[in-house]
Amino acid sequence: MVVQEPGTPRELERHLRPQDVSTIFFDDLCAAIGGQRTAAGATDNPRILGVALNPQVVQPGDVFLAISGAKRHGAEFAATAAANGATAVITDQAGLGHLGEGFGLPVASVDNVRKIAAAAAQRVYGTAERSPQLLGVTGTNGKTTTTFMIRSILDALGVETGLVGTIEMSARGQIIPSVLTTPESTQLHGVLARMAEQQVQSVAMEVSSHSLSYGRVDALRFAVAGYTNLTQDHLDLHGSMQEYFETKAQLFTPAHSQRAVVLVDDDYGVQLAQRALVPTESLSLDEANDKADWRVIELEHFALGHSFTLLHRDGRSISARTALPGMFNVANAALAVLMVLASGVELDALQAALDANDPLSVAVPGRMQVVGHAPVAVVDFAHNSDAIAKALDSMRPGSDGRRIIVFGATGDRDKTKRPDMGAVAARHADIVIVTDDDPHSEDPAPIRAQVAAGAQQVIDSERPKVQLFNLAPRAKAVEFAVSLAAENDAILVAGRGHEVSQDVAGIDVELDDRVELANALNLHGFVTIH
Ligand SMILES: CC(=O)N[C@H]1[C@@H](OP(=O)(O)OP(=O)(O)OC[C@H]2O[C@@H](n3ccc(=O)[nH]c3=O)[C@H](O)[C@@H]2O)O[C@H](CO)[C@@H](O)[C@@H]1O[C@H](C)C(=O)N[C@@H](C)C(=O)N[C@H](CCC(=O)O)C(=O)O
Ligand SMILES: Nc1ncnc2c1ncn2[C@@H]1O[C@H](COP(=O)(O)OP(=O)(O)OP(=O)(O)O)[C@@H](O)[C@H]1O
């Protein structure tokens, strides 16, 4: 597998561009997206080779889309875009004010730059004519895991695959580091055109709620959209759960998808399946749910995970297994299987690939990643209440063993979830060690205090035996957890998963939970898995 070395954002951007770009001139692009040339800029009509929203990643020949952001206006940085080789700018009224009279590049204006970004990129990169088939997964938790499973099944079927998500992007095994879960629309259209050039046939993609809010997946149509679940997160962006749900529901409309598979084990899933405007199959893990099209039956433990059968109300069935721990990974695996089936793969071929290759046992970095067995020591990405509860429940200590959790909450993000995360940890663990996650620009001590307060409330009212600690830095908290552990205990280090650095006041501090946990286990004489 070729791994693309991380570089500057501008160097990385080159890997998100196709080799061949159709010939389009600025005036034609403006006509296509409803842009008005303005007298403020130069009058020439350059050929456009690429599209960028971020001035720092502009490549020579790009049109720079200067958006009005929540904090700044992109047009404030037009000089950077020009220095990087932009040949034209599209912006809005406010942006024209920033550019001023006599700006040296051709300029066009539109009402809302974000709203035309995807259409402009589609036009320049030709993705209406060339794009792999897209399978998109949305939901609060499980997107990364489910997309890894989809890619793994498709690989087992001999399909040339791509992936777009939090951990990485990939095209036929070549990995491109990813910055966002779902990239900007300009980058998405670029990388999909590149994947098409590389003969990628199908792409499994995570569709975050941010991406739907910001129009990042506009001008894309998923062959299959999948829904995992909806629980509290990202209320800093969406304001309320209903708004969060409405944002996710956009994916299940004909503008964005052709058909869908929806897990109906939460109320939002039930609502979504009822109101989806595309042909939708529902899926439930509840064997008794006779309203669901597909149900999980014959569930049995297999290694750390489960084997199970998917049964359709019409009698069709598929048997599958995943070694990944937890019932939530049965949900992810079942969704992945049904999304691949809905994409047009024959059931017999799918069953043969599942039987021969065990694709649903694919390792997903930092997702329930087992670092030691005695004590059970796991690094996981759970960073909201539902995921913490489910991850803790899936941990199996030995008899009389305790569940120990080390986790924190991020700064600058949904503050309302902090006490809930603490409360859930105190309900599902025996020892709770609150530490730092990414503080970003916030002082970490008050964040820890807010999480710990939620845990303390549960201890006072429901679970007096739970031990609570507030300890930083994170590496010390991990070591402390191991120092408390016996061989029959289970330690969960949650929240950071695959991440290898912590953002502390804008500085990346090197930190990998998997390394810290392994070091601590070794230090205390326990065996680790290599
Ligand atoms: C909250 C959020 O999503 N913000 C996005 C939003 O930022 P914004 O509206 O605040 O923009 P801004 O910072 O005011 O900047 C406006 C313009 O000026 C430019 N600028 C701004 C400042 C500067 O110093 N230099 C500069 O060039 C920016 O590139 C941009 O073009 O628009 C920007 C441009 O489109 C995005 O880059 C930015 O994503 C930021 C980087 C981000 O971290 N987003 C995260 C939260 C996100 O999207 N996460 C989801 C997954 C969430 C999850 O499931 O956990 C994802 O899909 O990755
Ligand atoms: N189906 C699920 N239901 C609830 N929790 C889950 C599910 N799948 C995974 N999790 C938990 O959520 C964490 C994140 O999983 P994953 O990375 O697959 O989801 P995600 O939706 O991509 O998350 P994010 O958007 O935050 O990157 C896992 O580490 C696990 O603890």
Image (spheres, helix red, strand yellow):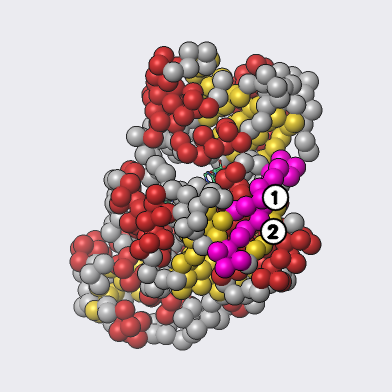
Q: Residue 225: image x %, image y %?
A: 48, 65
Query: How many labels, in total?
Result: 2
- Image point 65% across, 16% down: which residue? 484
Magenta stretch, main secondary structure, is strand
Q: Residue 64: image x %, image y %?
A: 38, 68
Instruction: Left or right? Give the position of 261 relative to 235.
Output: right
* Quadrant of the drawing holding the N terminus: bottom right
Instruction: Left or right? Give the position of 510 relative to 159.
Output: left
Q: Badge 1 local density, few (<14 within 10 Å), some, or many (20+)?
A: some
Residue 303 counted in the magenta span: yes
- Image point 44% across, 31% down: which residue? 421
- Image point 47% across, 58% down: which residue? 291
* C-alpha gap between disc 2 and disc 1: 8 Å
Q: Which residue is mark 2?
A: 319
* Quadrant of the drawing holding the C terminus: top right
The three-letter amino acid code for the residue at tag 2 is Ser
Quarter of the image for residue 454 reads top left
Q: Judging from the image, what secondary structure is the residue with disc 2 in?
A: strand
The three-letter amino acid code for the residue at tag 1 is Ser
Q: Judging from the image, what secondary structure is the residue with disc 1 in?
A: strand
Label located before the other in sequence (2 or 1):
1
Above or below 111: residue 246: above
Magenta region, residue range: 296-315
Q: Which residue is mark 1?
A: 307
Residue 146 visible from this viewpoint = no
Tag 2 near tag 1, CB within 8 Å: yes
Q: Nearer the viewer, residue 194 or 354?
A: 354
Q: Nearer the viewer, residue 20 or 258?
A: 258
- Image point 44% across, 48% down: which residue? 266
